Image (tube, rainbow, N blue to C red):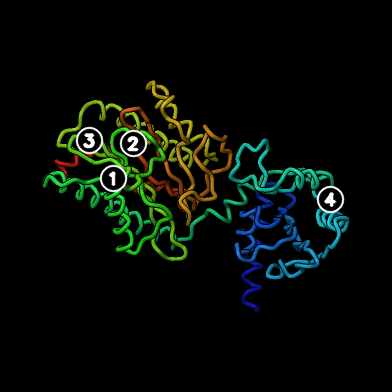
Amino acid sequence: MKNSKSSQEFHLNSIQNSIQEFGFDGWLLYDFRGLNALALKVLGISEAEKGSRRFFYFIPSQGEPVKLVHRIESSALDHLLGKKIIYLTWQELHEGLKEILGDSHKVAMEYSPDNANPYISRVDAGTVELVRGFGAEVVSSGNLIQYFEARWTQEQWKLHLQADELNRAAFDAAWKLIAEALRSGKTIREAEVQDYVMDYYTGHGMTTYHPPIVGVNANSGDPHYCPVPGADSEIKEGDFVLLDMWAKMDVPEGVYSDLTKVGFMGEKVPGKYKEIFDIVAAARDAGIDCAKSAFSQGRDLQGWEVDRATRQVIEHAGYGEFFIHRTGHNIGTETHGNGAHMDDLETKEDRLVLPLTCFSIEPGIYLKEFGIRSEINVFINADSEVKVTGGIQTEVTPVLSQY
């Protein structure tokens, strides 16, 4: 028990240091029946352990945390440090909340003004109104959440490098499978390549939540296309193919490698594919340069800035209307993690890009005949160095001449 308590105290110190760094008076973590999955993760409560009554856990910038729990579930937060207040009636809940907030002026919650960032907006409007009614300003806990949910350990960085090496090898294996089928005159379809990649992952100690995207010709123009066996397309010589593949090492703390590459099923890539790829690649590289520039200068970087730097390249080339998704997403134990995304399209991502976090940069141009996306992963290490993984594709792969 002593070791467990020491670990909790260390975690608490880290949280309070971060609360002070961001200028908050405290962090109010709230949940009702699992609605706030982010709070549950921070507090170490599994999906199976979520309760049926409201609870609050207030971590002040200094001093002892306070728990507010229902009498029926009074042990809900016993694994955490702090004083406990038990309520039964709604009046007691309000009095308890007023007590734990005290004279706090700026309180962080899983809230986003105007719901600008729905990924972190997990507290209902009524609860925000209740907290404001006690005189506290409610601010977003977005940066606090990613500080404790999105940063990687050194071991996870090593696991990512391992997954990255195997994932890149899986692309080679997939291109080779297609090339050999075309040379031998065998029929090969999108779903067959998809199944082959899934078997490759399993055979190499990897796992993924969903099969990869294998899109030929017009199907590559749909960013979320997914082959369906029996309704998928055949891959023929002269076709264009997009592969979007994501997987992690099959261990508890494994983190994803998420990459997209494109290939032409022939020996020489036609100019129409080269022209669009060169624009997409320039946009990708502009996003990388944006991150490198910010961290080399020691200035704060917000996710929207990377999206803007990337998107401007495609807009200036006249294809802005065909880039229909954000530039990138946070990467962690889930493909789309809880850290800052690279987004100035669907949301104005104003969370900071923090050291020890990873994200994708994956601009695309999606036309009726075909679509091109180029995706790499970016990790910011503890020294604020920008590490790019995935292998930067410099041209559309002429599959029949390289495999």
Few, some or many residues within 10 Å of mark 3 (<14, 14–19, 20+): some
Between discs 1 and 4, the one toward the N terminus? 4
Q: Which mark is residue 103?
A: 4
In the rendered image, which quarter is residue 248 located in? bottom left
Amino acid residing under circle 1: Glu
In the displayed structure, would residue 40 be above or below residue 7? Answer: above
Few, some or many residues within 10 Å of mark 4 (<14, 14–19, 20+): few
In the displayed structure, would residue 158 be above or below residue 235? Answer: below
In the rendered image, which quarter is residue 11 located in? bottom right
The residue depicted at 79 percent of the width and 64 percent of the height is 70
Q: Using the numbered discs, state the Cα–Cα distance from disc 2 to disc 3 in whole angstroms.
A: 11 Å
In-front residue for pair 82/177:
177
Few, some or many residues within 10 Å of mark 1 (<14, 14–19, 20+): many
Amino acid residing under circle 4: Asp
Which one is closest to the eye, mark 4 or mark 3? 3
Q: Using the numbered discs, state the Cα–Cα distance from disc 4 to disc 3 in whole angstroms.
A: 66 Å
Q: Which mark is residue 219?
A: 2
Residue at mark 1: 190
Total numbered circles: 4
In the rendered image, which quarter is residue 216 located in? top left
Residue 55 spot, x, y in % from top left: 74, 59
